[in-house]
């Protein structure tokens, strides 16, 4: 457990010490909230759908976590490039523990960023429907974060260079975000988009958070949790398997 | 099985990367407490051999023993037995020097007051105790090297591997570096296995030298024995006599290695 703890702590220390990373992580979600929340807010209201900012916040929180947790794979690339990975691989420690410690650290920093976005959204006028259910939204955020961080550690394990990692990252992250219902209600979209969204685990994470935070749901909380947990198990297994075969 | 006074035994060890043979049936023994040098030109197979001995690469053939343990079959026991300073830095530069030491201690299951004292003693030995709370990114190249030595010694290893440890260091730092190593070798009877392509370094530090070229050990003995074998008066002449005068094109083997990497499997 100590190995997992110290590797988790390492990620946290690195995050807290890199102030530019914190600012950068908050900047993009803030831009989405301001530009889309206020820019499309009136159109959304006129269409009879209510407050767009409130609809948007859970999606942007999930997006923040998705982008930040995927960033953990880049940390593995840096550890490869700057040699620290070799130090861990010659130590008498199982690779599973190394992967879990690092991924939990990456996931924690991602959740912190998601919570920061939530706090900012409160200042922008976001109103929580039921504060008691907020814990469910946080739980979803944590599961999503661990799943994505594990997945990105798997990607970071076999990709050879940072450019390759960035290409894969963008190829995966943007479709996951834009085809998830983060920015629009899935009720009124064409069927083909509904089918794609239904295959996208991000849709369930966002739907569950939206249910917990503003009482709106498309799939229902139970389905959201079941899909999310299955996804997490698969992605953690993928990350562990790939990390076991990592080369320094 | 290795002989009793041997801490490292290599028997017919081969490492292939696809069609490229990086290490070609090498056999040697290193005795407990010995200062042993692997001397060879760039791309000769020095680092590959160290990677196999330190469980980072799985040999394609042959057998390796370290501290009595089979390197392939008893990885954890082997990993506890050695410390290593890699050719390139392997520190977390965002953490402080002390935090890097702490991380290493946890990896090796060390904790408590004795460990903290050991960290302090080692950091004092390498003259970094006063800089312990500075992030490593602000250390000079020499300071980073010294910290890596202190870190490698933290868990009382039986063998210390140094892969081209003084590459890029100035003369003063090199001198200081070898003083620490010799002190630990003397005080703790720790075996030191280092690779280098600096002939004068191998001659000044090592008790025995293995010359490796094109993945094969082409000569093995003390500096005097190597000079006698080649009828030369300096180790440099002996070295050139054995390995030839042509410049090696490391790029070709590196490129081949790169292409063939997909076919190789590292040690798990």
Image (spheres, grey):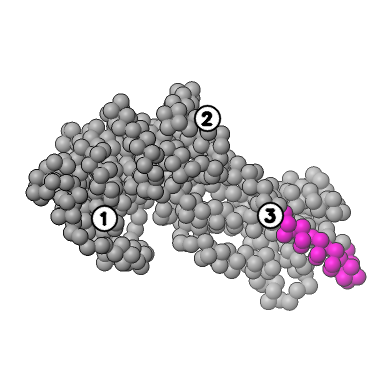
Q: How busy is the neighbourhood of tag 3: few (under 14 within 10 Å), some, or many (20 plus)?
A: many
**Residue B77 appears in view:** no
Q: Residue at x 44, y 47 (%)?
A: B89
Pointers 1 and 2 within a single chain: yes
> For mark 3, what is the residue?
A25
The chain letter under disc 2 is B
Pointers 2 and 3 within a single chain: no
Q: Position of residue A198 (x, y in %)?
A: 66, 67
Earlier in the chain: of badge 1 and badge 2, it is 1
Q: Nearer the viewer, mark 1 or mark 3?
A: 1
Q: Please state which of residues B192 and B26 is positioned toward the viewer in this rendering.
A: B192
Give the structural element (helix, strand or loop) at label 1: loop
**Above or below: residue A28 compared with residue B186:** below
Q: Position of residue A234 (x, y in %)?
A: 54, 57
Q: Is residue A48 magenta?
A: yes
What is the chief secondary structure element of the magenta stretch?
helix
Q: Residue at x 65, y 43 (%)?
A: A16
**Residue B225 appears in view:** yes
User: Marks 2 and 3, how far apart in space?
Assistant: 35 Å
Give the structural element (helix, strand or loop) at label 2: helix
**Above or below: residue A59 compared with residue B164:** below
Q: Residue at x 54, y 42 (%)?
A: B138
Mark number displayed over residue A203:
none
Q: How busy is the neighbourhood of tag 1: few (under 14 within 10 Å), some, or many (20 plus)?
A: many
Q: Residue at x 81, y 53 (%)?
A: A121
Q: Position of residue A65 (x, y in %)?
A: 67, 54
> For mark 2, what is the residue?
B130
**Which segment did they paint magenta?**
A25-50
User: Marks 1 and 2, how far apart in space?
Assistant: 38 Å
> For mark 1, what is the residue?
B41
């Amino acid at each position: 457990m100590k190995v997992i703890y110290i590797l988790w702590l390492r990620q946290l220390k690195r995050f807290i010490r890199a102030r530019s990373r914190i600012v950068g992580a908050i900047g993009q979600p803030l831009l989405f909230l301001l530009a889309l929340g206020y820019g499309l807010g009136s159109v959304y209201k006129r269409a009879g759908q209510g407050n767009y900012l409130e609809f948007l916040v859970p999606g942007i929180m999930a997006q923040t976590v998705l982008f930040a947790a995927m960033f953990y794979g880049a940390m593995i690339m840096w550890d490869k490039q700057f040699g620290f990975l070799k130090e861990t691989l010659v130590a008498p420690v199982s690779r599973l523990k190394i992967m879990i410690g690092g991924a939990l650290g990456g996931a924690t920093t991602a959740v912190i960023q998601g919570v920061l976005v939530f706090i900012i959204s409160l200042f922008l006028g976001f109103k929580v429907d039921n504060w008691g259910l907020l814990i469910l939204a946080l739980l979803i955020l944590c599961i999503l974060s661990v799943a994505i961080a594990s997945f990105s550690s798997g990607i970071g394990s076999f990709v050879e260079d940072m450019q390759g990692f960035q290409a894969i990252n963008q190829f995966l992250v943007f479709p996951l975000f834009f085809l998830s219902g983060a920015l629009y209600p899935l009720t009124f979209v064409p069927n083909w988009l509904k089918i794609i969204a239904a295959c996208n685990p991000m849709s369930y994470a966002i739907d569950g958070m939206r249910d917990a935070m503003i009482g709106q749901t498309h799939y229902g909380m139970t389905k959201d949790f079941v899909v999310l947990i299955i996804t997490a198990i698969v992605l953690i297994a993928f990350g562990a398997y790939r990390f076991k075969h990592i080369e320094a | 099985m290795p002989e009793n006074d041997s801490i490292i035994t290599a028997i017919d060890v081969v490492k292939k990367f696809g069609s490229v043979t990086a290490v070609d049936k090498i056999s040697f023994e290193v005795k407990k407490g010995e200062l042993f040098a692997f001397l060879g030109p760039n791309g000769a197979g020095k680092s590959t051999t160290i990677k196999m001995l330190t469980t980072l690469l799985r040999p394609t053939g042959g057998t390796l023993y370290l501290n009595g343990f089979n390197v392939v079959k008893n990885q954890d026991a082997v990993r506890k037995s050695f410390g290593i300073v890699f050719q390139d830095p392997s520190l977390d530069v965002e953490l402080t020097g002390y935090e890097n030491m702490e991380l290493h201690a946890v990896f090796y299951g060390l904790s408590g007051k004795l460990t903290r004292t050991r960290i302090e003693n080692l950091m004092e030995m390498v003259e970094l105790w006063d800089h312990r709370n500075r992030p490593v990114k602000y250390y000079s190249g020499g300071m980073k090297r010294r910290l890596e030595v202190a870190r490698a010694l933290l868990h009382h290893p039986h063998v210390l591997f140094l892969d081209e440890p003084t590459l890029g260091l100035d003369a003063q730092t090199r001198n200081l570096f070898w003083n620490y190593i010799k002190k630990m070798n003397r005080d703790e009877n720790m075996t030191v296995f280092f690779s280098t392509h600096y002939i004068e370094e191998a001659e000044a530090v090592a008790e025995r030298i293995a010359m490796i070229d094109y993945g094969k050990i082409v000569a093995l003995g003390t500096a005097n024995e190597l000079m006698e074998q080649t009828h030369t008066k300096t180790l440099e002449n002996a070295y050139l006599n054995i390995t030839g005068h042509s410049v090696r094109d490391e790029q070709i083997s590196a490129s081949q290695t790169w292409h063939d990497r997909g076919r190789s499997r590292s040690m798990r």
